[in-house]
Image (cartoon, rainbow, N blue to C red):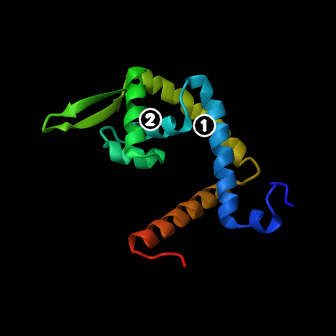
Amino acid sequence: MSTTGAPENVAKRLGYAMKRVQHALRMSMDEALRATGITAPQYAILCSVEAEAGLSNARLARAAFVTPQTMQGMLANLERDGVLVRHADPANARVLHTELTSHGRVLLADAHRLVAKVEDVLTKTFETEEADRLATLLTTCAENLRADRASGGSVD
């Protein structure tokens, strides 16, 4: 039995190791962000809106790894809390553009500092180049799987 509680052959699998890190990161981020009153998925939404105001609900849902239905509720809650505002597109009233409020920008700046501390702990034993390389490798892994799904490939 490994220190993870999983059988040794499972604990050494790449997918298991990635899921374990993802779970630990999510727990650490939620704990750190609790002081701001937002969760890790809400943080992902706010980061996406900060990077590109006006994103569609579908794109925000993909960025936060939630369904479009869940995104609708999350956006409504963030809007209710004064963190962001949505307004209809002048050319198509069914399209809502999402923007951070001034309160949202201040909250997000605090959240960025807290998440940076979590990421510092995540990579505290890495050289900067190693952390950068890991991020590149993980991005490549995600792109490989996305491309395989898009091409109709399946892992048999």
Q: Which residue is mark 2?
A: 46
Task: Specify the amino acid type for callout 1.
Answer: Val
Visible residue check, residue 128: no
- Return the residue nearer the eye: 87 or 125: 87
| Helix, strand or loop under label 1 | helix
Task: Specify the amino acid type for callout 2.
Answer: Leu
Q: Residue 112 lies in what quarter of the image? A: top right
Q: Residue at x 39, y 69 (%)?
A: 150
Contact check, label 2 and label 1, Cβ < 8 Å:
no
x, y percent for residue 73:
40, 33
x, y percent for residue 56:
31, 43
Chain-order first, disc 2 or disc 1: 2
On screen, residue 52 versus residue 104, left or right, reads: left
| Helix, strand or loop under label 2 | helix
- Return the residue nearer the eye: 52 or 6: 6
Q: What whole-number distance in Å separates the C-alpha atoms at marks 2 and 1?
A: 13 Å
On screen, residue 20 versus residue 146, left or right, reads: right
On screen, residue 115 versus residue 151, left or right, reads: right
In the rendered view of the protein, which quadrant contains the C terminus?
Answer: bottom right
Q: Which mark is residue 155?
A: none
